Amino acid sequence: MTSSRSRPSASRSPRDNASRTAAKPAAPRPAAARKPERIPADRTLLLLNKPYMVLCQFTDEAGRETLKDYITEPGIYAAGRLDRDSEGLLLLTNDGKLQAQLTQPGEKTPKTYWVQVEGIPSEEKLAALRAGVELNDGITLPAEARIMDEPAVWPRHPP
C-alpha cells in the first residue's frame, strides 16, 4: 500500500556535489521544550453508549441533544464521531495525544463498526467498501466488510 503522506526529497543538484566533500557536520540543535507526558493518574477515559439522535459534540445552536446532556466531566473530548442517527460505543478522554492518535487520518488507527442497513448488501456493495469509497474529501481506506449474524443487544428505539 502506498502512503499519501509527503516525504522529504534527498536529491541534490550536480552543483551541490562540490560542496558535499567540504560539508561540516551540522551543529546540534537545542532540545525543544517538550510538554510533560500526562501521568496515568491524570488521564481520564470514559466510555459512552451514545444514544440515537444525540450529537457527538458538546454544543449545538439548534438546541438538539449533545454529549453535554450525558457527560459532566470537564475537559473531556470525544475520540471519534458517530452520526446523530447512529448509536454505539464512544470513547471520550482528556488525553489530547490519545485523542489525536485515534482520530487523525494520518495515524490510520483501525476501527470496527457494526452497521445495520436496509436489506442485505450485495457482494458488489461489500467489494466497493473493501476497495475504498470516494467521499467529498477523498477516498476512504479499504475496509474489511462482511455480513455478520444479528448480535444480541439491548432494546433500541428505533429497533
Image: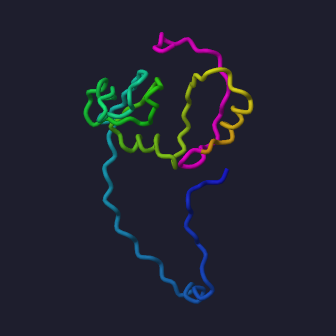
- Left-right relation of 120 to 79: right
Q: Residue at x 46, y 40 (%)?
A: 102
For the point 45% across and 76% down, which residue is it? Answer: 26
Does residue 124 appear left or right of residue 22 in this picture?
Answer: right
Answer with the quarter of the image where residue 63 lies: top left
Q: Looking at the picture, how far across and down is residue 120, in whole percent?
A: 68, 21
Left or right: residue 155 versus residue 5 is left
Relative horizontal placement of residue 157, taking residue 18 as reference (left or right): left
Q: Nearer the viewer, residue 93 or 31?
A: 93
Residue at image coords 55%, 28%: 113
Is 157 placed above or below 123 here?
A: above
Position above or below: 89 against 128: above
Image coordinates for residue 97, horizontal then vertical, percent: 39, 44
The residue range painted magenta reads: 135-159
- Indicate the position of residue 145 as horizontal and vertical percent values: 66, 31
Give coordinates of residue 121: x percent, y percent: 68, 26
Query: In the rendered image, which quarter is residue 66 located in?
Result: top left
Quarter of image, res 69: top left
- Farthest right residue? 123
Whether residue 14 appears in magenta in the rendering, the answer is no
Measured along the vertical axis of the image, is residue 101 above or below residue 29? above
Is 136 one of the magenta-colored residues?
yes
Q: Tell me the chief SS of the magenta region.
A: loop
